[in-house]
Amino acid sequence: MIKKMFAVGLLSLGMVAGGASAVSADEDKNCDDFSSGDEVMEYWNDNNFSAENDPDGLDRDSDGQPCESLTEDWEPSEDQESNSEETSESSESAVSNDKNCDDFENHEEVMAFWYENDYDENNDPHDLDRDNDNLPCEVSQSEWDSFVADKEDGSESSSSDEDTSSESDEQEATDSEEEASAEQGEEGGELPDTSSNNPLMMLVGLIISAGTGLFLILKKQLT
């Protein structure tokens, strides 16, 4: 009886060991399990294997190239090249200097960054607006409205000051031109108090002048 029980135990132990070996064999890969370099490299890359991480022992010389009998002259297929190009394009399109909410010291900096780059819920390359409500890093609606109002008021005030300055300069230029024109248009200064434009007075002056001249001539002849 004891012998039978011992035999059954050995048999059971053997079956368990055999099953474990089978599972281990199914998981382990050898170069003979692949039919092409594409299969080898797909398995290798999908599992992120490398010369330092090669649990199946596919890279016997640890040079980073598995199953060299299949991959020695291997070149990626069109599908693999396409996948590689898509991965490269995706990497190139990644945002440079990607920003996270933790990179900003306060909401004022976040809103300034968001406003200056004209971001919104449909244009959010840094993914600062996770819930797509057009409010980055969970700032409140009142904070954002106040910030935008201050920005727009500042812009309008600056524009108004520029317009006022321009109008003032134009007015000064106009006044200067009018003054210059007035000075050039004057025909002379005011006449002295002794002058007159009366024709009768002018005639009297001529008679007196003529009489004085005649008197001088007669006096000279007499002497």
Image (cartoon, rainbow, N blue to C red):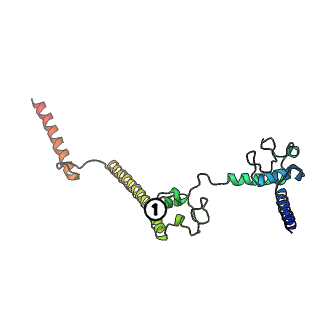
Residue 216 in picture, x, y percent from top left: 13, 35
Q: Nearer the viewer, residue 15 or 206?
A: 15
Work out which quarter of the rendered image holds the C terminus and state it: top left
Quarter of the picture containing the N terminus is bottom right
Residue 191 seen by the camera: yes
Residue 43 position (above or below residue 122): above
Q: Give the x, y percent position of residue 27.
A: 82, 57
Q: Quadrant of residue 154?
A: bottom left
Q: Residue at x 59, y 59 (%)?
A: 126
Q: Is mark 1 on a helix, strand or loop?
A: helix
Left-right relation of 170 to 197: right
The vertical placement of 41 against 216, above or below, is below
Q: Mark 1 points at which residue?
A: 151
Label 1 sits on what residue type? Lys
- Residue at the extreme top: 223
**Left or right placement of residue 109 versus residue 81 in this view:** left
State whether residue 213 is above or below residue 182.
above
Indicate the position of residue 198 as horizontal and vertical percent values.
Answer: 22, 53
- Judged from this view, the residue extending furthest toward the front is 1
Near mark 1 (Cα within 10 A), the count class, few <14, some 14-19 or many ≥20, is few
Residue depicted at 86% across the width and 49% down the height:
31
